[in-house]
Image: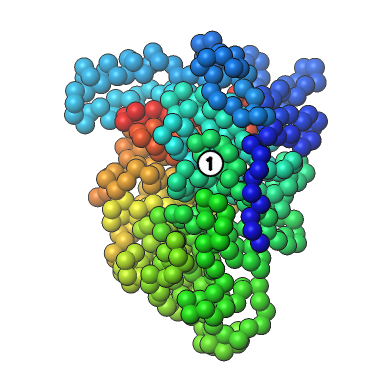
């Protein structure tokens, strides 16, 4: 089915009627907090007195010089981003120059006090705590672009000033999935109709956005059963110029630029048709499998000789060329040993029977033994949505992955575990705590093991692990509000020495935000 081409520029978006009487507003329009009964603060809003706001310079009016370009239906927000407290930063910079010199001592002076955000963008007051977690955050030369419940917004990298806001196509839609991988300045967002009380509905549409202008490049609908109304639906794998989308009975590979067909995931290289995982009966062969994007495009599928009751079953892992759909290599593994892709670069595979192990990206051969520990001890994504696991990253020959005990519930201690990719040997593990979350910053490269750490009511911080013994050094501490003022789905992204924390829902306080730019020692 050819994609629907977007013929009109982005239009204003009317939010659906929200729970608790939230009125409809245009997308990008500032929301007002709901009225509260006398003597009681509104739900999700701060107790009196309200926290102080940072002083802001006057903002130009719409259409005046210096105002960012806006698309029709995306009005200028009345509440500008909160700017940084420059005094503390300046004093720290002076201290670094005087006391730290040009050496490594500069890394540690900033940890003595909470370092304020460079800026933060207030959360839309109509968002609830049940918003769907959406990972999509992208960067251009000028902007950080964020996928939010009702659409996509771009903010100036240095100031947080909104550049544009584009609603999802059609009224009453809510984002459900957005891979953070992008290529050619194009972001992909999956979405569907909103359900009650702010919960996400059926995830059955995909749209592509130009990250420089906000224009909707194309959109397409898919058939998704979602019989239990859980919002389950599409898997979207993004790698290079290709977008591989899997629905209940449909697998397509589209070109990100225009939504046209790139190649057919439902056929093998010899032209023979594969069977879908929904098929109850088949004549053998291989399934269409699942795709995971990122730096590499990896396909994992189940195969059988004869019918599906045969004992001759195996798994296959392939490195796929995004432009042609052809496998650069394919390796066979025992049945049940290659079920999920943890990371596409370095390439790390997980299976119920085979544990977790690494493959050579160039050849597909196993790099060594499986990682020590049971597979269920690792923090893996709850569903196969087409993206690699966020809480895992490779740094040279070391692979960091979050670990926990799923049987412990909310009190399960969590830690960061380091493995040698060639041997699978556990090198060390960090302090374990039920309240700690470790997220390795995979965008920083191979040189340093940098991790963003949150711990309940403690200050979130940027830390560095020693690759030899796992000793953790705090580099920068941020105010506690950086954690408590973000809602569900908060993730850190490292870009050119600045740490951007994005969130899709309201925090536990009224002064919550959807985006915060945090200084680092590279800022």
Q: Which residue is at 41% across, 34% downward?
A: 141
Q: Secondary structure at mark 1?
A: strand
Residue 393 visible to the viewer: yes
Total marks in image: 1
Q: Does residue 508 lie above or below 180 as drawn? A: above
Query: Which residue is situated farthest in the front direction here?
Result: 7
Q: Which residue is at 68% across, 34% downward?
A: 11
Disc 1 marks which residue?
Answer: 210
Q: Which residue is at 61% across, 73% downward?
A: 277
Q: Residue 345 appears at what percent x and percent y?
A: 37, 57
Which image quadrant for residue 117?
Answer: top left
Judged left or right of residue 486, residue 373 is left
Q: Which residue is at 51% across, 72% downward?
A: 301
Q: Residue 485 appears at what percent x and percent y?
A: 56, 29
Residue 456 visible to the viewer: no
Q: Residue 299 appears at what percent x and percent y?
A: 48, 67
- Judge by depth and name the residue closer to the eye, 471 or 418: 418
From the image, which quarter does the C terminus lie in? top left
Judged left or right of residue 54, residue 418 is left
Q: Does residue 383 lie above or below 40 as drawn? A: below
Mark 1 nearby-residue class (10 Å; few <14, some 14–19, many ≥20): some
From the image, which quarter does the N terminus lie in? bottom right
Which image quadrant for residue 69?
Answer: top right
- Judge by depth and name the residue closer to the eye, 4 or 483: 4
Q: Residue 513 appears at what percent x and percent y?
A: 57, 29
Q: How is the image coloured?
A: rainbow
- Judge by depth and name the residue closer to the eye, 341 or 425: 341
Which image quadrant for residue 279?
Answer: bottom right
Q: Does residue 139 lie above or below 260 as drawn? A: above
Judged left or right of residue 386, residue 91 is left
């Amino acid at each position: 089915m050819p994609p629907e081409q977007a013929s009109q520029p982005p239009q204003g978006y009317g939010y659906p009627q929200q729970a608790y009487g939230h009125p409809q507003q245009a997308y990008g329009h500032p929301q007002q907090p709901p009225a509260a009964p006398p003597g009681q603060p509104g739900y999700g809003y701060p107790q009196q007195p309200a926290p102080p706001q940072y002083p802001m310079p006057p903002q130009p009016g719409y259409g005046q010089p210096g105002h960012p370009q806006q698309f029709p239906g995306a009005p200028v927000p009345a509440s500008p981003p909160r700017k940084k407290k420059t005094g503390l930063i300046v004093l720290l910079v002076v201290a670094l120059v005087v006391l730290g010199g040009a050496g490594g001592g500069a890394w540690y002076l900033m940890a003595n006090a909470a370092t304020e955000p460079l800026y933060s963008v207030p959360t839309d007051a109509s968002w609830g705590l049940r918003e769907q977690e959406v990972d999509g955050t992208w960067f251009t030369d000028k902007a950080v672009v964020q996928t939010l419940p009702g659409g996509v917004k771009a903010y100036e990298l240095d100031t947080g000033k909104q550049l544009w806001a584009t609603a999802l196509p059609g009224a009453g839609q809510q984002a459900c999935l957005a891979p953070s991988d992008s290529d050619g300045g194009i972001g992909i967002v999956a979405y569907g109709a909103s359900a009650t009380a702010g919960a996400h509905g059926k995830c059955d549409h995909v749209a592509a956005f130009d990250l420089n202008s906000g224009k909707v490049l194309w959109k397409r609908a898919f058939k998704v059963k979602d019989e239990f109304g859980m919002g389950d639906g599409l898997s979207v794998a993004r790698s290079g110029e290709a977008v591989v989308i899997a629905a209940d009975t449909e697998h397509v590979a589209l070109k990100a630029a225009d939504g046209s067909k790139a190649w057919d995931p439902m056929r093998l290289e010899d032209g023979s048709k594969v069977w879908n995982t929904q098929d109850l009966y088949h004549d053998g062969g291989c399934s269409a499998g699942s795709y995971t994007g990122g730096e590499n495009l990896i396909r994992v599928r189940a195969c059988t000789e004869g019918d599906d009751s045969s004992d001759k079953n195996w798994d296959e892992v392939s490195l796929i060329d995004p432009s042609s759909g052809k496998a650069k290599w394919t390796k066979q593994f025992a049945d049940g040993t290659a079920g999920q892709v943890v990371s596409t670069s370095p390439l790390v595979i997980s299976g119920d029977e085979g544990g977790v192990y690494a493959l050579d990206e160039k050849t597909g051969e196993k790099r060594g033994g499986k990682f020590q520990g049971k597979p269920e001890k690792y923090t893996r994504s709850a569903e196969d949505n087409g993206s690699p696991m966020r809480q895992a990253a490779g740094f040279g020959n070391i692979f960091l992955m979050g670990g926990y005990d799923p049987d412990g519930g909310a009190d399960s201690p969590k830690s960061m575990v380091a493995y040698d990719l060639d041997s699978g040997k556990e090198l060390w593990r960090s302090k374990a705590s039920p309240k700690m979350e470790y997220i390795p910053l995979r965008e920083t490269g191979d040189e340093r093991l940098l991790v963003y750490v949150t711990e309940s009511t403690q200050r979130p911080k940027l830390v560095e692990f020693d690759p030899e013994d796992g000793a953790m050094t705090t580099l920068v501490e941020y105010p506690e509000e950086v954690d408590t003022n973000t809602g569900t789905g908060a993730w850190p992204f490292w870009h050119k020495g600045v740490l951007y924390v994005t969130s899709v829902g309201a925090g536990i306080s009224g002064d919550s935000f959807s985006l915060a730019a945090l200084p680092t020692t590279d800022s």
